[in-house]
Image (tube, helix red, strand yellow):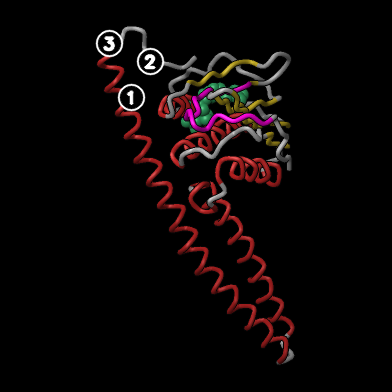
């Protein structure tokens, strides 16, 4: 379990948790702002340029200039590709703010996007019992899932990843399971901040984070967190969607 050093006093731990939250809030704000600028600024400008270039291409074709018309059409194709990449980047930077899809919708999109473009099959299994959560809680959970998926692909070279959300009796868990090479002993090295940040995020929502080898192969990252008491519910589990 990732936690504070055993020697820290209760007072130190409290101060550290406040600092962690502030650092995360600033980082999230900056990411959100960058994502919105990218989406509303650059993407819109490129879309305008692509629309003008379509007109140019048609006009060249109408004036019997097939060479320049084809070149203009190629520019449109490249622009559309670039717009798609910039939009994906913007959605990754502010996954919750841009589409308002909530936790289930956003995790589902994350799984689909990974399966579409990152060489691994990623599925999402939701749970009908899970209530809508506060936006900050949702954002922390999405960031945990993003980092765990990135690690599974980059370090684990996983071919399959499963994101699972489960809720019952006032408690919930988000787990990200991969079939990659597994932990090779260096996971607590100083170089990376991903595991630490996932731990901060889990604590920021009153939960805990565990990263463990999977029986057989790969790694499972689990964030257990409490649900607000009014959000307890009674229905059964449900496989929401896979890509
Ligand atoms: N799913 C995984 N499969 C295999 N190894 C993993 C996995 N997740 C984490 N690790 C190991 O744990 C280490 C620490 O992960 P962490 O996310 O903290 O850092 P990083 O990914 O190396 O860098 P950063 O996240 O800062 O870009 C990784 O370098 C890797 O060795
Ligand atoms: Mg990482």
Q: Position of residue 187 (x, y in %)?
A: 53, 19
Whether residues under marks 1 and 2 lie with C-beta atoms below 8 angstroms apart, the answer is: no
Mark 1 vs mark 2: which is more N-terminal? 2
Q: CA distance from mark 1 to mark 2?
A: 9 Å
Whether residues under marks 1 and 3 lie with C-beta atoms below 8 angstroms apart, the answer is: no
**Disc 3 crowd, CA 10 A, few/some/many (<14, 14-19, 20+):** few
Q: Say if the magenta span includes residue 234.
A: yes
Q: Which residue shows up at 73% across the image and 40% down it?
A: 242
Q: Secondary structure at mark 1?
A: helix
Whether residues under marks 2 and 3 lie with C-beta atoms below 8 angstroms apart, the answer is: no
Q: Which range of residues does the magenta coloring cover?
A: 220-235
Q: Position of residue 82 (x, y in %)?
A: 59, 60
Queried on whether the Cβ of the residue with tag 1 lies below 8 angstroms from ligand 1, the answer reads: no
Residue 9: assigned label: 3
Q: Mark 1 sits on what residue?
A: 17
Q: CA distance from mark 2 to mark 3?
A: 10 Å
159 and 27: which is toward the camera: 27
In the displayed structure, 19 sits above or below 71; it is above
């Amino acid at each position: 379990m990732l936690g504070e050093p055993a020697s820290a006093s209760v007072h130190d731990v409290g101060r550290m948790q406040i600092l962690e939250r502030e650092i995360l809030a600033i980082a999230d704000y900056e990411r959100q702002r960058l994502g919105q600028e990218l989406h509303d600024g650059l993407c819109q400008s490129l879309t305008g340029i692509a629309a003008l270039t379509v007109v140019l291409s048609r006009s060249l074709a109408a004036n019997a200039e097939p060479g320049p018309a084809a070149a203009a059409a190629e520019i449109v194709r490249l622009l559309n590709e670039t717009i798609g990449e910039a939009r994906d980047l913007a959605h990754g930077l502010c996954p919750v703010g841009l589409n308002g899809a909530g936790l289930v919708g956003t995790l589902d999109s994350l799984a689909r996007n990974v399966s579409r473009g990152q060489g691994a099959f990623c599925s999402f299994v939701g749970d009908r019992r899970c209530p809508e959560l506060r936006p900050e809680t949702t954002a922390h959970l999405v960031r945990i899932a993003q980092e765990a998926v990135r690690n599974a692909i980059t370090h684990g070279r996983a071919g399959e990843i499963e994101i699972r959300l489960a809720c019952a009796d006032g408690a919930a868990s988000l787990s990200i399971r991969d079939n990659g090479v597994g932990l090779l002993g260096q996971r607590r090295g100083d170089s990376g901040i991903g595991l630490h940040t996932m731990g901060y995020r889990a604590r920021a929502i009153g939960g805990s984070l565990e990263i463990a080898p999977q029986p057989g192969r790969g790694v499972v990252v689990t964030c257990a967190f409490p649900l607000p008491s009014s959000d307890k519910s009674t229905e059964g589990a449900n496989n929401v969607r896979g890509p």
